[in-house]
Amino acid sequence: MTCRQLGGPCDLPHHGETHDDVINAQDRHLKEAEKDGDAVHLPARKEMKNRWLHPKKSMGWYREMQAAFAALPED
Ligand SMILES: [Zn+2]
């Protein structure tokens, strides 16, 4: 899945065995972008932080990502 499919602004692809892998890869990617002062990724980084703080509210997003991941062909 790409950064964009996970709510981010770029097309960097993430690969993983499970949706958890790609979500964690996106989390790392957003943290690195923040560290590098990448303003374009900041809104997505804030949203991701918010999701960890409010896991129940974020279940909808999480399930969407799980479904999106499951719908992708294996590569
Ligand atoms: Zn990105």
Image (cartoon, rainbow, N blue to C red):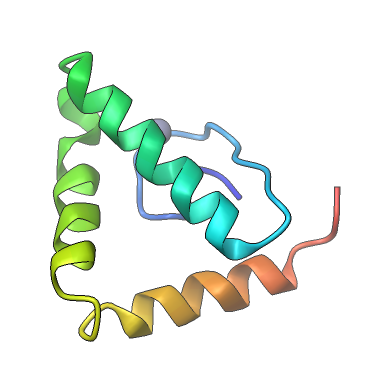
* Image: 47 above or below 40: below
Total marks placed = 0
* Image: 9 above or below 23: above
Horizontal placement of 55 versus 11: left or right? Answer: left
Q: Is residue 38 visible?
A: no
Q: Residue at x 19, y 26 (%)?
A: 34
Examine the image and state in which quarter residue 32 appears. top left
Q: Residue at x 18, y 54 (%)?
A: 49
Q: Is residue 1 visible?
A: yes
Horizontal placement of 5 versus 36: left or right? Answer: right
Q: Residue at x 75, y 63 (%)?
A: 72
Horizontal placement of 11 versus 54: left or right? Answer: right
Front residue of this view, candidates 5 and 52? 52
* Image: 11 above or below 48: above
Front residue of this view, candidates 53 and 41? 53
Residue 12 location (% of width, % of height): 53, 31
Examine the image and state in which quarter residue 13 appears. top right
Front residue of this view, candidates 5 and 24? 24
Residue 36 location (% of width, % of height): 22, 13
Residue 48 location (% of width, % of height): 25, 55
Residue 67 location (% of width, % of height): 60, 78
Q: Quadrant of ligand 1?
A: top left
